[in-house]
Image (cartoon, rainbow, N blue to C red):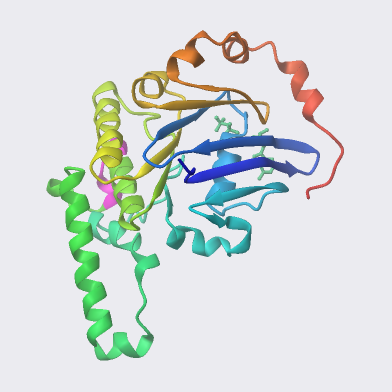
Amino acid sequence: MTALLAIENLSKRFGGLQAVADVSLQVAPGEICSVIGPNGAGKTTLFNMISGVLRPSSGSIGFDGIDLATIPPWRFAAAGIGRTFQNLALFKHGTVVENILTGRHTHLRSTVLDAVLWFGRTRREEISARQRVEHIIEFLEIEHIRDAVVGTLSYGQQKRVELARALACEPKLLLLDEMVSGMNQEETEDIARFVLDIRDELGITVLMIEHEMRIVMDISDRVHVLNFGRKIAEGTPDDIRRDPAVAEAYLGGNRAATTARTTTGADA
Ligand SMILES: Nc1ncnc2c1ncn2[C@@H]1O[C@H](COP(=O)(O)OP(=O)(O)OP(=O)(O)O)[C@@H](O)[C@H]1O
């Protein structure tokens, strides 16, 4: 099957630091994949390149048949890449519904004149956006907080709103960055169930960065392991559990490698 996401020899350098080094990986349509690795392994940098926040120093990212280098970063969401962020990125003074509606902006086609005159296209877009938002609210079981101001909600609830906003852009690929960090066990289990439903019921492919190993091992089809910017392993959760290189990466003893990967090259 053709990969939905095909990353080839991707690298990112920040000054003298090689944050991501020659990483290749593929995600097939309908998969739930995880990227794991110790702190500073390059996971967020990898996500930032896939979502257009950062441009790669070298290598390529193919998504749904498009070379992402050929389109501007602000079109990545419209191409079908949605994401959540490690640190919540919500409008704290807005309501849940208002925050989720902001995720629809990639689907807006109306001109200013359409909007001023409240003509056909604007009206259709507004109705379609509202319907999509209502569906997501029901899907993620957040009806009871729909009109609440986001800043007043618990951390777990805000994370769910962020997930809702990422779904509002109708992504083909959903990037989840540490969704369950700081959550209790019940909230973590809820998120694991939602991620499975997002794949099974909405047909969305999922790539997640996660430190919480229970969710990684329970719901991933494949796991990619980074350490010091390089991919050191790939496989099913069982493969990864048994891989001595992965155990070694997590046990540490890698301080020398920090020095080894720090080079004097400039950002490409
Ligand atoms: N904008 C930047 N400028 C300079 N260095 C950066 C930048 N962003 C990340 N780095 C460095 O690149 C390396 C990889 O960082 P990254 O955040 O991608 O790791 P991570 O695997 O996501 O870590 P964590 O699990 O702690 O979030 C780290 O050494 C980090 O300090």
Q: Main secondary structure of the magenta part?
A: helix
Image position, residue 34 (x, y; %): 46, 30
Name the one closer to the observer, 111 or 22.
22
Residue 10 vs 99, above or below: the answer is: above
In percent of width and height, residue 93 lies at 31, 57
Front position in the image: 192 or 173: 173
Horizontal and vertical percent position of residue 21? 71, 35
Q: Does 266 sit left or right of 97 as displayed?
A: right
Q: In screen coordinates, is 113 left or right of 146?
A: right
Q: Outermost residue, right direction? A: 264
Q: Residue furthest left?
A: 144
Where is residue 73? Give x, y as percent: 56, 60
**Residue at 36% of width from left, 56% of height from top?**
91
**Nearer to us in this view, 144 or 205:** 205
Q: Quadrant of the N terminus?
A: top left
Q: Residue 36 vs residue 255: left or right? A: left
Count of marks, rendered view = 0
Residue 186 drawn above or below residue 44: above
Q: Is residue 109 above or below residue 218?
A: below
Residue depicted at 22% across the width and 51% down the height: 136
**Residue 147 appears in view:** no
Does the image show residue 240? yes
Examine the structure image and report whether residue 196 is included in the region drawn in magenta.
no
Q: Residue at x 23, y 73 (%)?
A: 126
- Res 226 → quadrant: top right
Q: Quadrant of residue 128?
A: bottom left
Q: Which residues are magenta?
A: 150-156
Where on the image, by quarter, is ligand 1?
top right
Q: Is residue 71 above or below residue 63?
A: below
